[in-house]
């Protein structure tokens, strides 16, 4: 049957309409940045810079610096069909992250955020009043008072890390730093977040370890991922309808069962333990005077009881955000200190002075390990632990430093480019902890160092991550010196397509017992 309208076959009409629709939806939007007066590379219809992103991967500091030099500190690109404004200008960043935060309060566009479980309930994916309330409810769980109560657990996990390094020192064989620090952070998160004791450093086949690591795998070969990136407005309602989530359902059910068991045991046994699952479950009951200034723009939200899905989802988020990031930072700090023995000498002297007469690292000692902290901060500059960028979404029309930014525009901050910019960091590829002395930090623009983000949506677990890294590393350097070996890769080659900056051949090092004269 040949359908016709006024004598014209319908197929001919469609053939004429489809190119027009293609132009309206996929060609015309590509002129957006030109209209805004913003430079940038020429995009392809539909895919934008998609293939370029695939080739470059997540780890591309040199490319980011090159783009900043070619197009300036503000330029435009397209991720699939989504326009993205790349911003590295520090004054614009201050406006976006702090002064005009209310206009850039979302991390990602609504079209790129699935309202599924657990992803849809992650703190980083919430927006509006929902985000404010959950952030306000969770913030006291990360206060210095609550973190102090976790010192015993972290010291216990760090003792095992030091023992594992000691086993390598006894045999003289190299060790994979990332594997050892990964075991430490896995044990630390299991204890501090989920209130359960595991020995991932001795038993890597523990179900907690297996299910936790499942969530860290991102399958780039999955066509659903690419369809979602290229056609989010089409795929989002479909994926939400079938409750398809990036985190495996089997692993979510495992963590949900862990939560149920822990809460049941504590309810029937009257057990109260300090861990984030318990703190999140009870967060809305915190007294007002227990609130603490977290050193950020104040978030005006309400404390509300969290649902089980909120508690379990954000427990998973703390695991995903804290496991790889902290373990890699620790491994790379060891690597940097192995290649810079003078800096390691400074760390060892500081640890000896601070820990004299002590076995465990208490809150006072943490505050005194300033040089070790400088080494960690410089490592975070060289290997920022998140993905290659930080995002915000404009939720209403805004004017920032004279540039009109329309509602819905995605803002992307090239963190690697900023951290490797020679104009901000002379000799950017060199490990120089002294960049982070108190005096140097006061002279430098705070938006030149962004491993934990900035403003009200900065990393809520920043202080816990620093505390973990300092305790774990201090315990190691109390007894051992870390050295390069024949298998140590210099310089490190980072895998391009890993979300976190993982070394291609691992981080191979060796340890030797400290010389008695050093004690």
Image (spheres, helix red, strand yellow):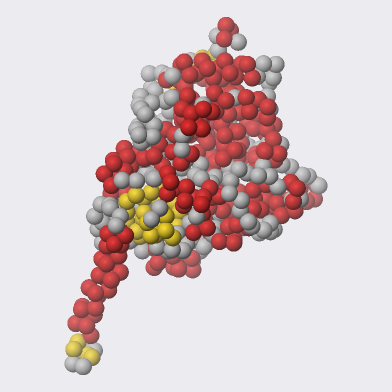
In terms of depth relative to the viewer, which is nearer, 28 or 101?
101
Instruction: Report the residue that reaches farthest toward the front.
Output: 402
Circle count: 0
In terms of depth relative to the viewer, which is nearer, 401 or 367?
401
Question: Is the N terminus in the top left, top right, bottom left or bottom right quadrant?
Answer: bottom left
Instruction: Give the x, y percent position of residue 22.
Output: 26, 70
Say left or right for 336 vs 147: left
Instruction: Give the x, y percent position of residue 5.
Output: 23, 91
Instruction: Report the residue that reaches farthest toward the top.
Output: 517
Q: Can residue 237 be seen here?
A: yes
**Quarter residue 422 falls in:** top left
What residue appears at the point 67 percent right and 38 percent down from the top-left corner? 144
Instruction: Give the x, y percent position of residue 56.
Output: 31, 44
Q: Can residue 259 be seen here?
A: no
Q: Is residue 121 above or below residue 377?
A: below
Say left or right for 8 vs 183: left
What residue appears at the point 26 percent right and 66 percent down from the top-left corner? 27
Question: Is the C terminus in the top left, top right, bottom left or bottom right quadrant?
Answer: top right
What residue appears at the point 23 percent right and 85 percent down from the top-left corner? 10
**Quarter residue 336 falls in:** top left
Instruction: Give the x, y percent position of residue 11.
Output: 21, 82
Q: Is residue 95 above or below residue 369?
A: below
What residue appears at the point 65 percent right and 44 percent down from the top-left corner? 293
Say left or right for 267 vs 1: right
């Amino acid at each position: 049957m040949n359908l016709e309208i006024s004598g014209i076959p319908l197929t001919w009409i469609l053939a004429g309409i489809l190119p027009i629709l293609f132009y309206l939806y996929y060609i015309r939007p590509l002129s957006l940045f030109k209209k805004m007066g913003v430079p940038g590379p020429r995009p392809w219809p539909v895919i934008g810079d998609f293939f370029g992103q695939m080739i470059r991967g997540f780890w591309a500091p040199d490319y980011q610096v090159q783009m900043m030099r070619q197009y300036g500190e503000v330029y435009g690109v397209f991720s699939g069909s989504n326009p993205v404004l790349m911003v590295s200008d520090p004054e614009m960043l201050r406006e976006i992250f702090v002064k005009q935060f209310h206009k850039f309060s979302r991390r990602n566009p609504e079209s790129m955020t699935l309202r599924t479980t657990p992803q849809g309930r992650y703190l980083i994916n919430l927006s509006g009043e929902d985000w404010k309330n959950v952030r306000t409810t969770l913030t006291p769980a990360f206060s210095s008072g609550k973190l102090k109560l976790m010192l015993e657990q972290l010291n216990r996990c760090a003792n095992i890390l030091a023992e594992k390094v000691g086993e390598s020192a006894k045999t003289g064989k190299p060790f994979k730093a990332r594997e050892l620090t990964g075991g430490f952070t896995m044990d630390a998160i299991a204890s501090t977040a989920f209130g359960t004791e595991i020995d991932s450093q001795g038993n890597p086949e523990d179900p907690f370890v297996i299910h936790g690591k499942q969530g860290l795998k991102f399958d780039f070969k999955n066509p659903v991922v690419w369809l979602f990136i290229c056609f989010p407005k089409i795929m989002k309602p479909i994926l939400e309808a079938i409750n398809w989530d990036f985190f495996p359902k089997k692993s979510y059910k495992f963590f949900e069962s862990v939560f149920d068991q822990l809460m049941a045991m504590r309810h029937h046994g009257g057990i109260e333990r300090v861990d984030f699952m318990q703190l999140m479950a009870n967060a809305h009951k915190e007294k007002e005077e227990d609130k603490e200034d977290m050193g950020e723009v104040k978030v005006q939200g309400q404390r509300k009881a969290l649902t089980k899905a909120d508690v379990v989802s954000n427990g998973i988020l703390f695991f995903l955000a804290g496991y790889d990031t902290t373990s890699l930072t620790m491994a790379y700090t060891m690597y940097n200190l192995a290649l810079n023995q003078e800096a390691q000498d400074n760390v060892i002297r500081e640890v000896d002075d601070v820990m004299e007469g002590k076995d465990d690292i208490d809150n006072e000692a943490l505050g005194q390990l300033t040089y070790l902290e400088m080494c960690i901060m410089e490592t975070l500059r060289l290997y920022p632990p998140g993905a290659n960028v930080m995002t915000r979404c404009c939720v209403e029309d805004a004017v920032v430093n004279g540039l009109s930014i329309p509602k819905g525009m995605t803002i992307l901050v090239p963190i690697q480019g900023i951290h490797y910019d020679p104009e901000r960091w002379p000799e950017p590829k060199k490990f120089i902890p002294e960049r982070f002395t108190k005096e140097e930090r006061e002279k430098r623009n705070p938006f030149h160092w962004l491993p934990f983000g900035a403003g009200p949506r900065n990393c809520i677990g920043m202080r816990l991550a620093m505390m973990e890294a300092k305790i774990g590393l201090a315990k190691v350097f109390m007894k051992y010196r870390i050295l390069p070996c024949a298998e140590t890769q210099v310089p490190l080659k980072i895998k391009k397509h890993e979300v976190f900056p993982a070394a291609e051949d691992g981080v191979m090092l060796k340890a030797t017992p400290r010389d008695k004269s050093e004690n």
